Amino acid sequence: MDTSSVVLTGDTPEGVAEAIRASIPGAISLPDFDDDDAWVARTALATTAAVTQGLLTPPLLLVMSGALAHHAPALGFAQRAARRAVRGYVLIDPQLPRPGQASDWPDAPVIVVLTDADDPRARDARLRGWEVLTGDAAHLVAEVAARP
């Protein structure tokens, strides 16, 4: 995989984002936007700017975490609207998107990374048919990025 296609959204914890950037050359972190209502639009615009500047090469692996991961369907829709392919979604210790948030989402594989093996979100993710990985988030994201 072209590592210039790994996008860490601004909600990725800095220690995790730093470790991911260290293990995946070319991975970029987008700015952190505090306004939940405008997060998708601002993140989509920052992604477009990074692609335009040649910092990212689609298809993209979108990495989101925490509470803002519930925006994954909307961010995926924004990428499709921009005619930009998404290779997959990696959700780290996420607030899972609500079922039915977007009728045609997910449009690419979803991998849920949980740092706690006993996390109850694993069950919900598996019921949706999503892959669940547990352990060190940075290491697991690097493994996912390296997949063909």
Image (cartoon, grey):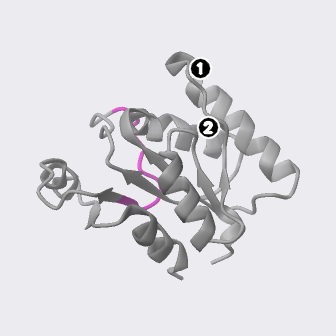
Q: Circle 2: is it few (<14), some (14-19), or many (20+) Cα within 10 Å?
A: some
Taking 38 as reference, is 126 above or below it? below
- Which segment did they paint magenta? 101-111
Residue 46 horizontal/vertical position (percent): 73, 38
The residue sitting at 52% across, 17% down in the picture is 37
Question: Residue 84: image x %, image y %?
Answer: 69, 52
Rendered image: mark on residue 78: 2
- Which residue: 56% across, 22% down? 34
Question: Along the horizontal axis of the image, is 15 left or right of 83?
Answer: left
Which residue reaches farthest bottom?
A: 148
What is the quadrant of the C terminus in the image?
bottom right
| Badge nearest the viewer, 1 or 2 | 1
- Disc ID at residue 38: 1
Callout 2: helix, strand or loop? helix
Residue 135 found in image quarter: bottom left
Question: Which of disc 2 and disc 1 is earlier in sequence?
Answer: 1
Residue sticking out furthest to the right = 53
